[in-house]
């Protein structure tokens, strides 16, 4: 999208960019993009869109659309664009690392929960068999109940462990982003 504008008698052509981001990340992204020549488009109000889980009406994610513009004839545009792509890749990697904090513990907890359910099903079949196998029912019910109780604790411990493992990587990516932004800012000045 392109628009032209006159300021103080000189012609300026703008290019535009829209970024959809979590509200918590919006300020960080606005500051980052400013280092590549982008400025918030004051002609448009920020648009907040919310997503709700189906049927429940509970709030899940709050997103914002950031609308920016920059001069099409900006100096060092190719290098700024390359740095901006690196910036966007680092932001995406941080998002993936944040998701990885909970993904592996979730899989572990779900697996243990499903195994617990399988043991509980075996216990149920043992008690409903003819003749009922009470001892087998009790033996299968114990790991079944453990499989239903342990996932919560496994998840919490797994998230804590993954967070400790991922935080240095996330901090490293933030440092890389700050270096990229600093290079972009130097090219603007």
Image (cartoon, rainbow, N blue to C red):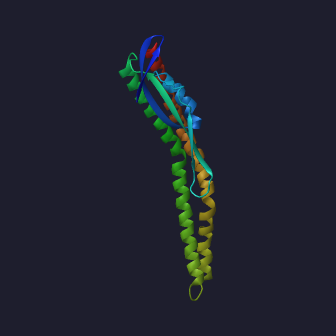
Compared to residue 97, the image places residue 73 above or below, namely above
Taking the image as shown, residue 183 lies to the left or right of residue 130, namely: left
Residue 174 image point, x, y percent: 51, 30
Compared to residue 134, the image places residue 183 above or below, namely above
Residue farthest toward the bottom in the current orientation of the protein: 131
As rendered, which of 74 and 123 lies closer to the eye?
Answer: 74
Give the residue at x 53% y 56%: 108
Quadrant where the N terminus is found in the figure: top left
Give the residue at x 62% y 54%: 57
Residue 48 occupies quadrant: top right
Residue farthest toward the left in the current orientation of the protein: 78
As rendered, which of 45 and 19 lies closer to the eye?
Answer: 45
Compared to residue 159, the image places residue 79 above or below, namely above
Taking the image as shown, residue 77 lies to the left or right of residue 25, namely: left
**Can I make out residue 87 in this image?**
no
Give the residue at x 57% y 53%: 53
Compared to residue 83, the image places residue 186 above or below, namely above
**Number of numbered discs present?**
0
Residue 113 image point, x, y percent: 56, 62
């Amino acid at each position: 999208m392109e628009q032209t504008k006159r300021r103080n008698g000189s012609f300026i052509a703008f290019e535009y960019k829209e970024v959809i981001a979590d509200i918590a990340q919006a300020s960080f992204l606005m500051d980052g993009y400013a280092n590549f020549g982008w400025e918030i488009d004051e002609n448009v109000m920020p648009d907040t869109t919310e997503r709700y889980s189906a049927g429940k009406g509970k709030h899940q994610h709050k997103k914002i659309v950031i609308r920016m513009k920059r001069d099409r004839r900006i100096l060092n545009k190719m290098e700024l664009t390359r740095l901006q792509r690196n910036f966007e890749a680092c932001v995406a990697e941080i998002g993936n690392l944040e998701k990885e904090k909970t993904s592996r513990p979730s899989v572990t907890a779900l697996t243990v929960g499903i195994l617990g359910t399988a043991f509980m099903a075996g216990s149920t079949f043992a008690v409903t068999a003819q003749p009922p196998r009470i001892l087998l029912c009790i033996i299968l019910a114990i790991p079944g109940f453990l499989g239903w109780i342990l996932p919560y604790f496994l998840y919490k411990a797994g998230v804590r462990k993954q967070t400790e493992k991922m935080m240095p990587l996330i901090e490293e990516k933030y440092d890389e982003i700050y270096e990229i932004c600093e290079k972009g800012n130097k090219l603007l000045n």
